[in-house]
Amino acid sequence: MSQPTEELASKKITSQIKRSRGQLDGILRMMDDGRPCDEVLVQLSAVKSGVDKAMKQVIAQNIRKNVNCVNEQQLTDLQTSLELLLKTK
């Protein structure tokens, strides 16, 4: 993967994680304000979805970095990435 492409992917991942962190802060405020359980759960579900998306982006970035396997270690790294992908959902 070229350096600019890798940097762009990392920025997208960072952005997704920051968005999830902001949502979590909002959920804490909702709980402090005594908001109904169903409203809190909707927001928690959104955070979970965002974290899942970030995890998949991290795995995809790892796979892209290892797709041109030229040695045994790269093949092992790719296998590990694929196993991680299967475990996320």
Image (spheres, rainbow, N blue to C red):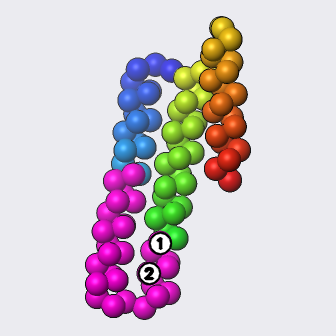
Residue, disc 2: 40
Is residue 20 one of those drawn in magenta?
Answer: yes
Callout 2 amino acid: Val
Q: Is residue 65 above or below residue 48?
A: above
Q: Is residue 87 above or below residue 77?
A: below
Q: Residue at x 63, y 16 (%)?
A: 74
On the picture, is 21 further left or further right than 81?
A: left
Is residue 38 one of those drawn in magenta?
Answer: yes
Residue 44 rendering spot, x and y as whole percentages: 47, 72
Q: Nearer the viewer, residue 1 or 69?
A: 69
Residue 20 rendering spot, x and y as whole percentages: 39, 59
On the picture, is 68 further left or further right than 31?
A: right
Q: Which structural element holds mark 1? A: helix
Q: Nearer the viewer, residue 76 or 15?
A: 76
Overall secondary structure of the magenta stretch? helix
Q: Nearer the viewer, residue 81 or 16?
A: 81
Whether tag 2 and tag 1 are in contact, CB under 8 A, the answer is yes
Callout 1 amino acid: Leu
Residue 61 rendering spot, x and y as whole percentages: 53, 32
- Graded by Cα atoms within 10 Å as few (under 14), some (14 to 19) or many (20 or more), the crowding at tag 2 reads some
- Quadrant of residue 35 within the rendered picture: bottom left
Visible in this render: residue 68? no
Question: Distance from label 2 to label 1 (Cα)?
Answer: 6 Å
Q: Residue at x 55, y 30 (%)?
A: 62
Q: Which structural element holds mark 2? A: helix
Give the magenta range: 17-44
Residue, disc 1: 44
Q: Nearer the viewer, residue 80 or 14?
A: 80
- Graded by Cα atoms within 10 Å as few (under 14), some (14 to 19) or many (20 or more), the crowding at tag 1 reads some
Residue 45 rendering spot, x and y as whole percentages: 52, 70
